[in-house]
Amino acid sequence: MITISRETDYAARVVLHLSLGGDGARATAQQIASERLIPKALVRRVVTRLAAAGIIQTTRGSEGGIELARPAAEISLLQVVEAMEGPLALNRCAVEPHTCPLSPTCSVHEVWCRAKDIIRLHLDQITFEQLAGKKEQSSWTH
């Protein structure tokens, strides 16, 4: 089974939570953990990685919190997945073709690469603004 990690799922929940609040919305790690059913320790780990990727930003202090680093319309599901997982691939050869001496002539390699490209394109077209229900979703539900 090909799956994303639990932390990647949690990362999508964090970004969605902030997107639902609208531009400039802030939340604490505790609020997100409680409302999105994420262990608090994992929220902090996910927030650190999302901040390093420039998807969210954090501010310390009584007026601080976690917020999106840019509008939800500019953050795709692919960006969150790749911030947590690294480059999307179904097979190592699709990301690092030089690791397999058969890649240049392997017809299966071509299929893995095409499938990767289709999934990347699909996830890149889904923004957190759409996921928050602020835009028509028919373009990505089919």
Image (cartoon, rainbow, N blue to C red):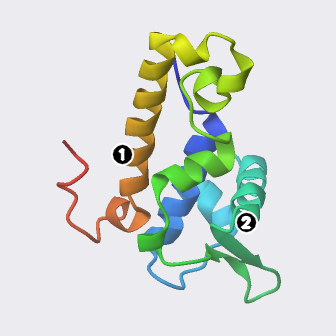
Q: Is residue 19 visible?
A: yes
Where's residue 27, x and y in %?
Answer: 62, 74
Sequence-wise, the earlier of marks 1 and 2 is 2
Query: Mark number for residue 51?
Result: 2
**In screen coordinates, is 115 left or right of 45?**
left
Q: At x 48% / y 83%, what residue is drawn?
A: 23
As drawn, the residue found furthest toward the right would be 61
Q: If the image is split into quadrants, where does the C terminus sit?
A: top left
Q: Which of 65/35 is in front?
A: 65
Residue 22, compared with residue 34, is above or below; it is below
| Percent coordinates x, y for residue 24 in the rendering | 54, 85
In the displayed structure image, the side of residue 25 where residue 48 appears, left or right:
right
Helix, strand or loop at label 2? It is: helix
Query: At x 57% / y 18%, what residue is drawn?
Result: 104
Question: Can residue 38 be seen by looking at this rendering?
Answer: no
Q: Is residue 112 above or below residue 9?
A: above
Q: Quadrant of residue 102?
A: top right
Q: Is residue 50 left or right of residue 125?
A: right
Instruction: Give neighbour class at mark 1: few <14, some 14-19, many 20+ (Cα, 10 Å).
Output: some
Residue positioned 56% across, 30% down in the render: 89
Which residue position holds label 1? 122
Task: Report the number of discs.
Answer: 2
Dot 1: element? helix
> In x, y percent, where is residue 36?
54, 53
Q: Is residue 133 left or right of residue 109?
A: left
Q: Amino acid at mark 2?
A: Ala
Instruction: Identify the residue at image location x=53%, y=12%.
Output: 105
Q: Nearer the viewer, residue 53 or 6?
A: 53
Three-letter code for the amino acid on which mark 1 is drawn: His
